[in-house]
Image (cartoon, rainbow, N blue to C red):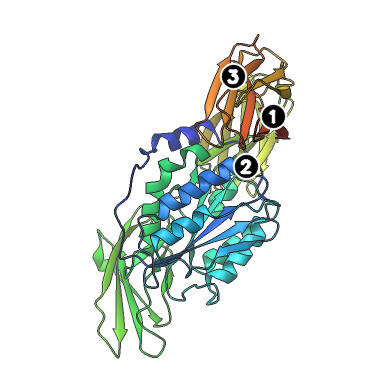
Amino acid sequence: MLAKAVLSLGLWLQFAAGQNTPERGPQPSTSNSEGDLLFLLDSSGSVSYYEFSRVKEFMWDLVQPFTFGPRDVQTSIIHISTTPTMEFPFDRYLSSGTLQQAIRNTQQLMGDTNTGKALSYAKEKFFSDEAGARPDVPKVLVWVTDGFSTDDISEPMQLLKDMGVTVFIVSTGRGNYLELSAAASQPPEKHLHFVDVDDLPIITKELRDAILDVIQANRLHAVDITSSSFRLMWPKLLSQETGYYTLEYAPLDDLARKRTKQVSGAHTSLMLSNLAPETTYEVALIPESNVHYFPPQTTRVTTLPEETSPAQVLISESGPYSFHVSWAPTLDSVIGYQILYGPLPGNSVKLLEVDGEHNSTVVENLAPNTTYLVTVTAVYKSGKEKSLSAKACTQEEGSKVRHLRFEDMGPNTLKASWDSADGKVLGYRVRCRRQTGPSSVISVSPQIRSVVLTDLASGTTNKVCVKPMYKNQPGKRLCRMVHMQPDAQGYKHRQRA
């Protein structure tokens, strides 16, 4: 099950530094691509109507430049809900206009977030003639999630990847980085994105280019690249009866160390392992056919730097007296971890020890509203050690707004009021996410505990959140969904955590 987690500040800064300017206007058409592209769409009740509509816009922006057809790109949608449902088969909409309308017409199903069940369903449809899927084209899964699932995803996701499906994940919520990075294809820097639902346009071009790397037709390419291996994939040119493939690969700076492998004509992929880290390999695919001549295909692939642990330290589930520390990756060469923590400023340090098979622990008996320096040290079997630090902040006691309520102030206008949060509050931040129209953020002083919200169109559902602000970090937010009744009938609201 995907647990809710808070990403470390460093990870968010790294992500923000790589943001691009959102695309505007029509995009040039992209041809010479062939593949089955499946969107796994969170259609459950954990997603608001506003968030669902923004994700639909993102899906269309992502595929709009593609050429659709039986020899080009085909697209389908599977809903994540109590029971998975396919919105339409891959081969139903083969033009941009009809596909755009089909995406616009997609309705949210609500229900539970049974992502594991939806992944198993996707595995069946990805290779089903009945669903319009094609047997010999690249398969790409784009999973858009708010970061939460009510069932296990690890096994069905691994089965999909083992069958050659490339998995991209877009998390618009507080997804657990460790679990989502394991679920996505490797490396996660290319296949996993964390972004607010209002900022989805920022990643559109980067994600589309990554998808194109997979579905570009008639091209040898590599996926699942690690420090010591990568998987080669190529279009089907031969069959078991008509020939075989010879694969040659060698480090670019030492071509004399060439190695050769042969696979039958039924293969369209091969995993190469025992490679050197941070090394560029020259790879050639030579189709050996007894029927037709096929020219060799070549590519260059660079392996990732050698894995070390910890490469990331994440702080989550912070409370007044404890927080959760996790790190990645876990390596067989590590025999144990030492976690040192102490308040800042100060010289008091305490030690926790964790065996090498685990990648998380809970630090307890802490002081409220305090900043701690946490250092995770990996102790290797060779005797070497590697350390990485992160800052963690405990929360104020009772640091949550209470009793958020609304008062009708006239057409399209509400007054939001709340009771004060505990502790030394520096102010409150009120965010209103409108179903139609722009979102707004209002900051007020700690003495003010109400704001007036305007431009709330009748018949719309809007999300209002109030969060107390403290010296070291924000407190817990309290949110409600507010539905504006049509024809001046007032409003209805319901709480949402």
In this view of the protein, can residue 428 be seen by the observer? Answer: yes
Q: Residue at x 49, y 72 (%)?
A: 133
Picture coordinates of residue 244, whole percent (x, y): 36, 84
Residue 472, which numbered label? 3
Picture coordinates of residue 392, whole percent (x, y): 60, 27
Which label's residue is closer to the chain start, 2 or 3? 2
Which label's residue is closer to the chain start, 1 or 3? 3
Label 3: how many Cα within 10 Å (few below 14, some 14–19, many 20+): some
Q: Residue at x 47, y 52 (%)?
A: 59
SS of the residue at dot 2?
loop
Q: CA distance from mark 2 to mark 3?
A: 30 Å
Image quadrant in which you'd find residue 8:
top right
Q: Residue at x 44, y 52 (%)?
A: 60
Label 2: how many Cα within 10 Å (few below 14, some 14–19, many 20+): some
The residue where tag 2 is placed is: 48
Instruction: Name the front one of labels 1 and 3.
Output: 1
Which label's residue is closer to the chain start, 2 or 1? 2
Instruction: Name the front one of labels 2 and 1.
Output: 1
Q: Which residue type carries mark 1?
A: Gly
Q: CA distance from mark 2 to mark 1?
A: 20 Å
Position of 217 compared to 159: left or right? left
Q: In the rendered structure, are the residues bearing label 2 and label 3 in contact, judged by CB atoms less than 8 Å apart? A: no
Given the current orientation, which residue lies at the most extreme front position?
487
Picture coordinates of residue 314, whole percent (x, y): 57, 37
Q: Which residue type carries mark 2?
A: Ser
In the foreground, 52 or 254: 52
Residue 490, which numbered label? 1
Q: Which residue type carries mark 3?
A: Asn
Q: Quadrant of the C terminus?
A: top right
Above or below 465: residue 284: below
Q: CA distance from mark 1 to mark 3?
A: 39 Å
In the foreground, 494 or 239: 494
